[in-house]
Structure formats: C-alpha cells, structure tokens
Amino acid sequence: MSDDRRDTGRRDERGRQRGAARAEGRTQRSAQAPSQRTRHADVARATAYDVLRAVDESDSYANLVLPPLLRERGVDGRDAAFATELAYGTLRLRGRYDAVIEQAAGRDVARIDPPVLDLLRLGTHQLLGMRVPAHAAVSQTVGLARSRVGTGASQFVNAVLRAVSREEPARWLELIGDAADPDGQDPVARLAVTESHPAWIVRALREALVGDGRSADDVTALLAADNTAPRVALVARPGLVDPAQLVEQIGEGARPGAVSPYAVVPGSGDPAAVEAVRTGRAGVQDEGSQLVALALAAAPLDGPDERWLDLCAGPGGKASLLAALAAGRGARLVANEVAPHRARLVEQALRAVAGSAVESVRTGDGREFGAAEPDAYDRVMVDAPCTGLGALRRRPESRWRRTPADLTGLAALQRELLGSALRTVRPGGVVAYVTCSPHLVETRLVVTDAVRAAAKDGLEVELLDARAVAREVAAGPLDLVGDRRDLQLWPHVHGTDAMHLTLLRRL
Ligand SMILES: C[S@@+](CC[C@H](N)C(=O)[O-])C[C@H]1O[C@@H](n2cnc3c(N)ncnc32)[C@H](O)[C@@H]1O
C-alpha cells in the first residue's frame, strides 16, 4: 500500500492518530463532549467531500479550495489535518480506489453517480489508506451520504463499503492488480491501478528513469513517492535570514534540509505562521527548486556577472532566491511573467529583497525577449511551464487531468522560450532550462531541438555539467547515476520534486 497509510499509523474512530495528541501534549480535546467531537470529525469529512465535488464539477484545484473551506468552517488542528489527508489522499489514490469499488460494487464506476462515487472513494480511503476503524469509516460516510445524496444512495454506499472492508488492503492490491493484468504480462497496467496513475504517465516515468540511467524497476518506488504527501521545505533567503537561525526560531522538529544549503524542514505546524515566512525573508519552496536556482547562480561564466533574468517567474519562488543571491553579489534581476496576476505574486515574493537587486518585475511574453533584447543578460532562468509530472504528490488531482495531448503544446512553447533565452543571454553567459517534469519530451528533446534551431541561426552553445555544479552547491552528497551532463532529481531518491536542469553556455 502507499506510504499514505504507513505514515498515518493506526487511527481512532474519528480518524485521528492514536496517542498523537498525548505525545505532543495537546490534550484539550478531551474536554469536549463526545457528541461535539463527532460533529468536528463530520465537518472534516464533509469538507473533504466538498473539495472532491469542487474538483469534479468545477475543475477546481484541491489545494486552492480546501484552505478557505477549512477557515470558513472553523476546522483546525487535527481535524484540519484529517480533512486534508482525506481529500488529498482520496484524490491521489482515486485510480486504485475506483478499481476496488468496481469489484466491491460489481459494476463499472462509470455507472455510479459522481457524487455517490466520491463518497465511496472517501470511505475507501478511510478503510484502506487511513486505517480508520471499519465501523467508524462506514457509519460516518453513510451518514454523510444520507445528508448529501439521500437514503437510497446511502444504502448502496453502506453495502459497497462493507464489501470493501471485508478484505485487507494488501489483498485488495492483489485483486485489482490481477484484474488489470490477468496473465502477469503487463506490469504497466498493473502498476497503473495498484499505484494509481494513468498508464501513459507510468510509461513516461519509466522511460524517463531509464533515460536518466536508472532501472525501469525504480518506477514502483517513484509512483509510491507520488502517493505520499510531501514534506514542506522552507528556503532561508540568503542575506535575509540564516538557515541555522531559522531552525532555532522554529524550534522543536525543525532541521536543515539535505539537498539545498538554504533549506529548513520545519516539522509540524503551519509554515505560514513562521515569522520569517510572513515577512518574506523565508518562503515555502521545494528543495529541488532551490537547488536548480543555486546551480544557475553558481554556473561558470566568462566576463561580467551583473544582470540576471528570470524569464517565467510567476509566482516568484526561484526569482526571490535568485534576487537574494544577486543582492549578495552586486548583481540585479529582471523578473518576467506573462500572467498579470502571477506577476503581482512575483512582486509580493520579492518584497523582502533589497530594492537594488531587483531591476524590474515585468509582465510580458518570454518568447519576445530574444528579439527585443539580444545579448542583454549574463544569467537567464527558463523555468518553463510544463505538465508538472514531477510534482504529482503536490497536486493531488493533476495526474487525472493531464493528457498526452498537453505535451505537444507545452513542448512547442518550451522550445520557443528556450530559443528566446539563448538569444537574450550574451555570448559567454549561461541559461538554465528547468522543468518540474522529467518527461523526456519536455526535457531532453526540447533542449536538443532548441539548440539545433539556434545553431541554424548561427548561435552556438555548449552544454555545461549541471551535475557537477549541483554537487558543488548541494547541502550534501547527491545520489546521481550515469555520466549525463543534465540533472534529474527524483522524489523517491532525493525527496524533492522531479526537477530537471540543463545548463547551457552561449559561445
Ligand atoms: C513553472 S512556472 C514558474 C515557476 C517560478 N519560476 C517559481 O519558481 O515560482 C511557469 C510560469 O511561466 C509562465 N508562462 C507561461 N507562458 C509564458 C510565456 N510565454 N512567457 C513568460 N512566462 C510564461 C506561467 O504563467 C507560469 O507562471
């Protein structure tokens, strides 16, 4: 089963981890009447259900819908954590649970009304993914079904969830795996249901692993990592707050990161409540994202090193790290973003950085820089819009929304953005091409095509050793295999998003 379940341990009937409150010294809940406690758990379940419906009906993003709902309904602490795990875990593992529900209900999920199906998925995640005791998972989900979809449907929910509860999670994995791959000849079909990813993504990730010199068998661990809630990491922006001080400020449970020397892993608690985060001296940022920005800043360069560009900057995570580094080196950053509302987020993210290090925040199409400002920058970051297949653990519903057709449009845009960057960087300057996707169509093929197209226009570039640069700046040893010059990080190996980095120097 997924790490979702291994991580959560045994839960009480309201879905909370047993003994966790006592261990953390948080026992005020015991002062509540049992009926009130049940109500809170019900609100958490109802909130998770409403998130699932919003994702299904209005194409909403769970991570944007859930926090305001929790606030409006006064759900906090462990109840908020329960609702979050219930909503995100159910969305991530939807493919696995649909296969279970199909067998338990004896009918195709396409023949189940979407609101009823979402209730079944929620109940199944409590039973198989969160280890909520069966009687509580079933009765509370049936109660929610009664209030939301009526008595008739709630009886169906009851019957199906009882059937789900009759088998252990490991047995369900065998059953659904065998149904998808009866002859044992189709590991992709089996993994697609047991590890809950569309088959085309399983295939693409396997190819990307092999392309990076890793074993195709690694895909199982990678898919399992995608099903695990990521640990939050903070970046202590250089010159604004020291990572060791930030660890101290946050206190118990906080520790330095393992990949980026500026990363702090805060442990439990709300990162938005950390004072340095509120003031913009620190921010929430995956360690892989930090590392690729650090690598661009450290890449060897001939000549002046004064003017940096972030071509696709919104919402400003890498721009604020780059600007903080630029401030320490007397350089200045231009941050560009095509979407006006995201350009405003970049301004917000840069608020704590010295004004002298930020030349401007612009709203424009990055594809136009090459023609409008040739040979103008010393370092350029192209953090390209991509499928996000390297950050699936962070965006629980995105694996079900993406299609292979997305790749065509994105790869064309990526090629144009990289082509523009290769023209706007000056000879001797460096471009970082970054995606939070390991898909070979978005990484290696885009780089090959853009470099070839640039050469046709008489513009020569050399591939720098991104791995060597990343190793120099990383907080600790980086587990990399093979002898490629581009860098691919992996959630199951490095604990980061699957960020890709190619470093190119204009000749
Ligand atoms: C992967 S995100 C960048 C993330 C950002 N660098 C960070 O670390 O916070 C890609 C961004 O590119 C922007 N974008 C898309 N097309 C663009 C274009 N033609 N020119 C500039 N930016 C573009 C998207 O709006 C999105 O904000």
Image (cartoon, rainbow, N blue to C red):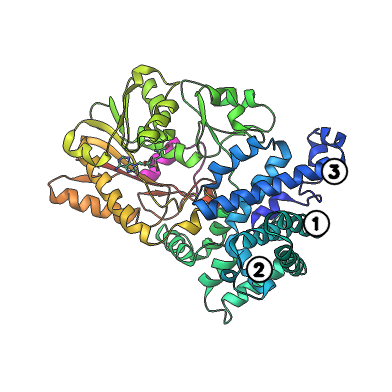
Q: Amino acid at mark 1?
A: Pro
Of circles 2 and 3, the one toward us is: 3
Q: Which residue is mark 1?
A: 133
Q: Is residue 195 visible?
A: no
Name the N-terminal-most of marks 3 and 1: 3
Measure the C-alpha gap from mark 3 to mark 1: 18 Å
- Quick check: 455 left or right of 191? left
Residues in magenta, as a range: 465-479
Q: Which percent across, then down, holds residue 490? A: 49, 51
Residue found 85% across the figure and 36% down from its top? 32
**Secondary structure under the numbered disc 2 in the rendered image:** helix
| Image mark for residue 349 | none
Mark toward the start of the polypeptide (2 vs 1): 2
The residue singled out by tag 2 in the image is 101
Q: Is residue 57 left or right of residue 457?
A: right
The residue closer to the viewer here, 343 or 273, is 343
Q: Is residue 42 above or below residue 358?
A: below
Left or right of 355? Residue 287 is right
Q: Which residue is mark 3?
A: 35
Q: Residue at x 68, y 40 (%)?
A: 80
Name which of mark 2 and mark 3 comes first in the sequence: 3
The structure residue drawn at horizontal position 39% and vertical position 31%, both measured from the top left corner, is 319
Location of residue 79 by image quarter: top right
Instruction: Judge by depth and name the residue closer to the eye, 293 or 127.
Output: 127
